[in-house]
């Protein structure tokens, strides 16, 4: 009787198992179909823009390659593009079905489809008509085979019989089973020890197991508390170190120098820029008296005022560090700190002071340059007034001098105005057709007399015919005359100055060569800078503003060209100007 009950129980369990399997399998098939359809929809939606764009430009080859690559990579069972009437435009799986030639006029409507899984996207191709993109990601397995079903059912029946037969034995081993399950949960990573406790009534082993679990829980809690304490301590140390490190990095990234002083005026801290300005390193400066960091007596005196406890005012002074051309001018801002000590802020103002000196020199030179032609004009006019009207030759000579000096004044004033416009970014070129032949004739007439007065041989090597170019005639003439005037100015008596001009279909090339004093390579690299004058002692004896070549360079660059120099000291210099004949003109930046 007991055996019969067990068999009946096993049969019921087997039937329930098979029914449960079939329900799960049916749901899996439905989900697989739904996922396949969703993937088909997503691929079709992503593909429609690319396909339409390629067909719009009649690039069916690129569209075919795109569709074939996608079908291969996504393992699509269907990847097809058709017109509204079903004409196949592209097919990644059946090339023979593709129409060899598309109709001139595409159908304006789209026929319906009975496909259940294939996704259809209708896209309008601009200027042609609608297309249909069909994508099918594949049909999932409909059902298990009969053999699989039979095997599963049989297996379920066997399992049910085994379960039924083992019920009696499990009643006796339930205590060990619960403990075994708890051990398996702990091995799998279960952290909540309350979940692995068992019933206290289990044949004596339940209470012992729960006591072990409680002890393990206590040990874990103690370990967590110790680790949390260590983390808080480490975080505090790291935060402090990180904060100081961030401040130090920020200070080192500044372009100004920072120096912190102790109450006894010794250096407590300095950033990288301060070390460079003071010509030392951070390690050597820290701990050093501040007065020893500066060699200037005036700076030491100012720092002495800073050390005076009665003085709490901010001090600003300038000092020079180093000697010669490499000397650095520093502006030092010093402010006392509460509680003693002070903070010094160092700024490099060397370039500002050089610019100030250059501007002062420019004003001095410009005054001299203006005074000389004005004096000559005044003297000539006085002689003209005193000379008899019958002395026509003398009057003509004086008038010629006045004309030359007036032109000289005009060039000087023009240079000043042009430099101001370039610095302000307002220099404007007036482009027009420029006939080059008359330009060089005027330049030759202007400088011939100057060259004769200095006993120089001035030669113009001009081609038989010069083209017409697009540019600003006055500014272009100004650039060439500035370079030529420099050549005459710095060539000693008896020397030669040659102006060579040539032009091709693209550019005008003007070379001005002299046998003057020349320049060193360092001077040649800086000669086009504003207010710059060479270090040669002979240059300081010749009046000049240091603006002529800078202005020439800016004007040439505004015309889209370039200017360069090759020079050998005591041998002479050759300046080369290259200007495109029809380049677009630019405004001053």
Image: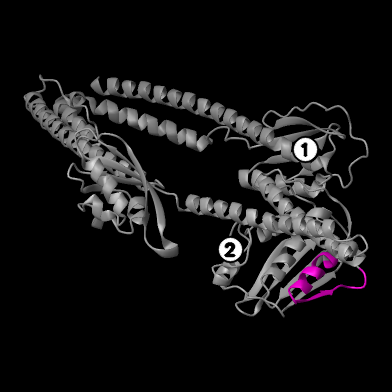
Instruction: Give the residue drawn at x 32%, y 21%.
Output: 9
How far from the left and from the top, in percent, is residue 355?
A: 53, 52
Q: How many marks?
A: 2
How far from the left and from the top, in percent, is residue 571?
A: 64, 80
Q: Out of 588 and 440, give the one closest to the viewer.
A: 440
Instruction: Tell whether 172 sits left or right of 140.
Output: left
Q: Which mark is residue 52?
A: 1
Q: Out of 293 and 412, give the one closest to the viewer.
A: 412
Instruction: Tell whether 491 sits left or right of 441.
Output: left
Looking at the rendered structure, the secondary structure element under dot 2 is loop
Q: CA distance from mark 1 to mark 2?
A: 68 Å
Q: Which colour assignment does the render follow?
A: one colour
Instruction: Tell whether 553 sits left or right of 13.
Output: right
Instruction: Give the residue drawn at x 52%, y 53%.
Output: 357
Q: Which mark is residue 237?
A: none
The span picked out in magenta is 444-465
| Mark nearer the N terminus (1 vs 2) | 1
User: How many other residues sit within 10 Å of disc 1, few (<14), some (14-19) or many (≥20)?
Assistant: some
Q: Is residue 455 above or below residue 394?
A: below
Mark 1 or mark 2, which is nearer to you? 2
- Does any portion of residue 330 appear in the rendered image? yes
Q: Out of 76 and 524, give the one closest to the viewer.
A: 524
- Does any portion of residue 241 appear in the rendered image? no
Query: Is the N terminus in the top left, top right, bottom left or bottom right quadrant?
Result: top left
* Residue 408 within the segment the image draws in magenta: no
Looking at the rendered structure, the secondary structure element under dot 1 is helix
How far from the left and from the top, in percent, is residue 487?
A: 70, 70
How far from the left and from the top, in percent, is residue 201?
A: 10, 19
Q: Which mark is residue 533?
A: 2
User: How many other residues sit within 10 Å of disc 2, few (<14), some (14-19) or many (≥20)?
Assistant: some
Instruction: Give the residue drawn at x 69%, y 54%.
Output: 370
Q: Is residue 393 above or below residue 145?
A: below
């Amino acid at each position: 009787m007991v055996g019969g009950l067990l068999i009946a129980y096993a049969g019921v369990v087997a039937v329930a198992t098979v029914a449960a399997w079939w329900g799960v399998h049916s749901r899996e098939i439905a989900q697989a179909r739904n996922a396949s359809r969703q993937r088909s929809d997503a691929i079709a939606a992503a593909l429609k823009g690319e396909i339409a764009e390629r067909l719009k430009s009649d690039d069916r080859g690129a569209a075919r390659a795109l569709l074939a690559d996608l079908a291969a990579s996504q393992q699509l069972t269907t990847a097809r593009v058709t017109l509204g009437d079903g004409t196949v435009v592209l097919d990644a799986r059946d090339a023979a079905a593709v129409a060899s030639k598309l109709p001139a006029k595409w159908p304006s409507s789209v026929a319906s489809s009975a496909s259940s899984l294939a996704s259809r996207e209708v896209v309008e191709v601009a200027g042609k008509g609608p297309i249909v993109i069909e994508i099918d990601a594949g049909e999932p397995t409909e059902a298990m085979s009969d053999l699989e079903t039979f095997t599963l059912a049989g297996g379920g029946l066997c399992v049910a019989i085994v379960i039924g037969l083992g019920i009696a034995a499990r009643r006796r081993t339930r205590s060990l089973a619960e403990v075994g399950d708890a051990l398996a949960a702990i091995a799998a990573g279960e952290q909540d020890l309350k979940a692995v406790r068992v019933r206290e009534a289990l044949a004596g082993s339940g209470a012992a197991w729960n006591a072990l679990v409680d002890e393990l829980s206590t040990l874990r809690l103690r370990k967590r508390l110790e680790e949390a304490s260590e983390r808080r301590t480490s975080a505090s140390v790291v935060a402090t170190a990180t904060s100081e490190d961030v401040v130090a990095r920020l200070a080192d990234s500044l372009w100004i120098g920072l120096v912190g002083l102790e109450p006894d005026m010794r250096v407590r801290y300095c950033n990288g820029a301060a070390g460079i300005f003071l010509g030392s390193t951070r390690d050597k400066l820290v701990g050093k008296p501040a007065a020893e960091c500066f060699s200037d007596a005036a700076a030491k005196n100012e720092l002495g005022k800073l050390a005076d406890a009665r003085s709490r005012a901010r001090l600003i002074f300038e000092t020079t560090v180093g000697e010669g051309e490499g000397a650095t001018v520093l502006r030092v801002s010093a402010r006392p700190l509460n509680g003693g000590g002070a903070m010094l802020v160092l700024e490099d103002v060397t370039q500002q002071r050089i610019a100030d000196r250059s501007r002062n020199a420019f004003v001095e030179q410009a005054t001299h340059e203006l005074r000389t032609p004005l004096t000559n004009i005044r003297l000539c006019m006085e002689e003209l007034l005193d000379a008899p009207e019958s002395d026509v030759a003398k009057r003509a000579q004086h008038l010629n001098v006045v004309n030359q000096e007036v032109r000289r004044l005009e060039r000087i004033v023009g240079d000043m105005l042009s430099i101001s416009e370039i610095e302000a970014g307002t220099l404007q070129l007036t482009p027009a057709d420029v006939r080059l032949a008359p330009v060089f004739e005027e330049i030759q007439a202007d400088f011939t007399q100057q060259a004769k007065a200095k006993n120089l041989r001035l030669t113009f090597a001009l081609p038989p015919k010069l083209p017409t170019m697009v540019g600003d005639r006055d500014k272009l003439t100004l650039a060439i005359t500035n370079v030529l005037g420099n050549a005459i100015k710095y060539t000693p008596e008896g020397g030669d100055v040659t102006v060579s001009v040539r032009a091709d279909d693209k550019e005008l090339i003007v070379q001005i060569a002299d046998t003057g004093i020349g320049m060193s390579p360092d001077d040649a690299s800086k000669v086009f800078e504003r207010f710059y004058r060479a270090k040669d002692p002979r240059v300081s004896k010749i009046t000049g503003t240091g603006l002529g070549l800078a202005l020439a360079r800016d004007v040439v660059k505004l015309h889209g060209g370039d200017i360069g120099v090759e020079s050998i000291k005591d041998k002479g210099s050759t300046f080369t100007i290259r200007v495109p004949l029809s380049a677009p003109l630019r405004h001053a930046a």
